[in-house]
Amino acid sequence: MRIRTALAFVLLLPSVSSAQARRPRIGGTDPGQSVPLSPQPNAVARSQAFVRSRYSIEAYPLISRVIAPSLSGGAASTWTSAGSGARLDWRSNPYMSFTFDLTSAYLGGQAITATAELGVRIHPEHGESRFRPFGDARIGYEHSGETNNQLQSSLGIGPASEFAARSRYSRGFGAVLGGGVEYGLTNTMALMTGVSAMRSNMAAYQFTGVNLPAGGDRFVMTTYRLTLGLKYNPVYSIKSSANEQTR
């Protein structure tokens, strides 16, 4: 009988030892439970705390070089003028945006030109690099009119000039191609620089005193522009506790 009791104790000893090994320690962690993950690195947490808005606004001065038929009806003439522009950008995906531009070149030159342009911008996804190149393709409406001094000469208010025989304005549609580089200054501000070329099929109209424009002839006008401006892109911060977005 004692031999049977001793044999049973020997057989049950491994099971008792295993149960004691699985018993959680008092004040400790159950080995069967998962260990909590360590906190995220600060750099990763900061990068995930901001989300860029799809909208951005850009304002820029520009220098415009225009090649067009002479206002006096002779050979093609060229002039350089300065002005400003504004752009509204809506990002449809990480690599493409839709853009709307309004520009005006009004300082210097033989004519004041203004454009309204609608197009797309191709660019890389926002990453760690502050430098981000881009390419533009747009279609636009262009309007051009003589400066005040030239209008005065053509209407007989000022001294006679070569523009007295033909004072006119023109308008038409064209295509724009360009490119440039964006440099990030802060989370919301970036410096933009770019070049573009616009080629427009214009229709010219004559001014005769105060009468309405009559007649018109067609010509091609090419405009080269250099821009340098600032871009503002709103950023949303994410509250990790409530997982909400706030400006």
Image (cartoon, grey):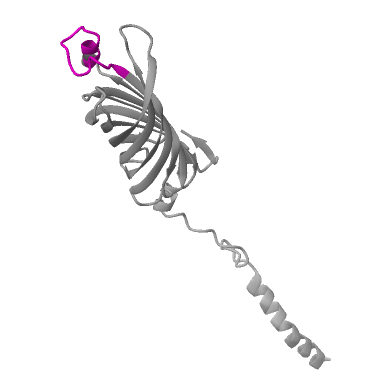
* Residue 210 in view, yes or no: yes
- Up-down relation of residue 93 to residue 201 (above or below): below
The relative height of residue 152 versus residue 96 in the rendered view (above or below) is above
The residue lying toward the viewer, choosing from 20 and 136, is 136
The residue lying toward the viewer, choosing from 133 and 102, is 102
For the N terminus, the image quarter is bottom right
x 40%, y 42%: residue: 136
Classify residue 71 as left or right of residue 175.
left
Q: Position of residue 222 (x, y in %)?
A: 32, 34
Residue in the foreground of this view, choosing between 187 and 25: 187
* Above or below: residue 207 compared with residue 53: above
- Residue 162 is drawn in which quadrant? top left
The magenta stretch is 150-168
Residue 195: give x, y in percent of width and height: 30, 40
Q: Is residue 159 magenta?
A: yes
Could you tell me residue 185's position as x and y percent? 30, 41
| Magenta stretch: dominant secondary structure | loop
Asked if residue 164 lies left or right of residue 99, the reply is: left
Q: Residue at x 30, y 27 (%)?
A: 84
Please tell me whether residue 222 belongs to the stretch shown in magenta: no
Q: Name the residue located 31 percent from the left edge and 20 percent from the top edge.
A: 145
Residue furthest to the bottom in view is 3
* Residue 100 in sight in this render: no
